[in-house]
Image (spheres, rainbow, N blue to C red):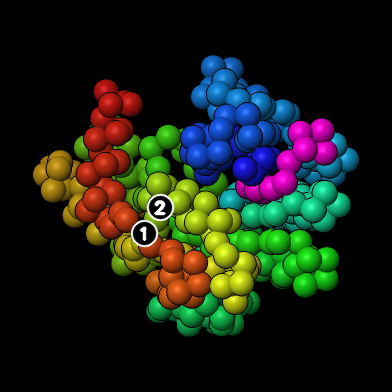
């Protein structure tokens, strides 16, 4: 049975991953950590919770040691738009946090997971059906962090034998915790606004395709990869995973099947649009499928139906 320490536990992925891991492995087996504590939060109330600033390597090591964990899932990071606004902070937090987490994993012999992103690709990467192994010359600080992170995780595996594993997540869509500071966040906001206002103004322009995935598929992917037979893994850091390649009009059309009067307009944000334009239109997840059986259950239609149902229950 795994004993897992998770950083960034109150973030977009963490909020749901903690609950899923506690279901699968037991509540006491999952130590949630974040830089702040929220009162009356399911993550805080359902099992062990510790305050942790991931730039404090000593505390991270001590927590991992005290709780005798054998797995570290490092999620704490600034997303692409915030990283572009605060590049030095992003470097310090994203890279400093990662190297601290890898060091704790090395010293305590832990299995290790951290997510990379479609942000690890750049304008010179093939845009359509982007291969697993290809050119990675991102032009954003977030992308620089993600490529460096992928290489660092490979290094810790090759040099020290740390069992590092990771995926390149596309935009993740969920109704539980809102994302903050990402480029793909429009694809979450649009559902909230569809329910609340019947209309949405997109900061990402018409015809801008990016990969997306519904959170339940993302959580299943993390667990499947961590449970995968290591002898089958040719890659480790980081597997392309995706469920759909969509643009704002696609989401609007899917929403109109449930809310026929839904209106979509545009007020493009040049910073986030430039980030989106530097990323692939669609990525190829064949390596993940072949090496550890990755499969996404939710397409745009199925995700839209579930998002709208769940958000109606939450917001109305
Ligand atoms: C972002 O938009 O920054 C993230 C990502 C794709 O990594 N959602």
Q: Secondary structure at mark 1?
A: loop
Residue drawn at (34%, 63%), measured in percent from left and top?
244
Q: Residues within 10 Å of mark 1 (few under 14, many from 20)?
A: some
Residue 80 visible in image: no
Q: Is residue 187 left or right of residue 154?
A: left
- Which residue is painted at 38% across and 62% down in the image? 295
Find the distance from the CA under tag 1 to the CA under tag 2.
Answer: 5 Å
Taking the spot 57% from the left edge, 29% from the top edge, the residue there is 27
Residue 182, x across and y down, in percent: 52, 51
**Where is 207 relative to 264, above or below?**
below
Q: Nearer the viewer, residue 256 or 42?
A: 42
Q: Position of residue 58 (x, y in %)?
A: 88, 40
Examine the rendered structure and indicate whether residue 72 appears above or below residue 35: below
Residue for badge 2: 217
Left or right: 273 in relation to 112: left
Q: How many marks?
A: 2
In the figure, is residue 104 to the left or right of 207?
right
Please tell me which residue lies in front, 295 or 96: 295
Is the shortest distance between ligand 1 and the CB of mark 2 under 8 Å?
no
Residue toward you, 255 or 65: 65
- Of the 4 image quadrants, the one containing the C terminus is top left
Q: 284 and 231: which one is in front?
A: 231
Residue hosting label 1 = 296
Disc 1 + disc 2, Cβ < 8 Å:
yes
């Amino acid at each position: 049975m795994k004993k897992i320490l998770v950083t960034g536990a109150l973030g977009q992925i963490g909020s749901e991953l903690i609950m899923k891991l506690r279901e699968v492995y037991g509540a006491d087996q999952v130590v949630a950590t974040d830089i702040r504590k929220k009162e009356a939060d399911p993550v805080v109330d359902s099992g062990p919770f510790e305050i942790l600033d991931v730039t404090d390597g000593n505390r991270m090591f001590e927590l991992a040691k005290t709780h005798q964990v054998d797995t570290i899932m490092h999620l704490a990071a600034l997303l692409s738009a915030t990283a572009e606004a605060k590049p030095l902070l992003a470097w310090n937090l994203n890279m400093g946090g990662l190297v601290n987490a890898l060091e704790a994993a090395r010293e305590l012999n832990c299995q290790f997971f951290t997510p990379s992103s479609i942000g690890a690709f750049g304008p010179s990467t093939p845009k359509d059906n982007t291969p697993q192994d290809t050119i990675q010359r991102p032009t954003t600080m977030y992308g620089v962090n993600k490529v460096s992170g992928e290489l660092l995780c490979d290094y810790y595996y090759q040099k020290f034998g740390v069992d590092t594993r990771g995926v390149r997540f596309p935009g993740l869509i969920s109704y539980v915790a809102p994302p903050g500071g990402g480029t793909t966040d429009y694809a979450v906001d649009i559902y909230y606004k569809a329910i609340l206002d019947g209309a949405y103004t997109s900061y990402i322009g018409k015809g801008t395709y990016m990969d997306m995935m519904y959170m339940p598929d993302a959580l299943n992917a993390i667990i499947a990869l961590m449970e995968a037979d290591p002898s089958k893994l040719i890659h480790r850091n980081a597997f392309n995973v995706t469920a759909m390649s969509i643009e704002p009009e696609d989401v609007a059309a899917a929403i109109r099947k449930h809310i026929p009067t839904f209106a979509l307009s545009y007020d493009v944000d040049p910073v986030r649009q430039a980030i989106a334009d530097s990323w692939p239109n669609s990525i190829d997840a064949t390596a993940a499928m072949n090496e550890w059986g990755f499969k996404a259950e939710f397409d745009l239609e199925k995700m839209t139906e579930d998002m709208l149902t769940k958000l109606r229950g939450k917001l109305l």
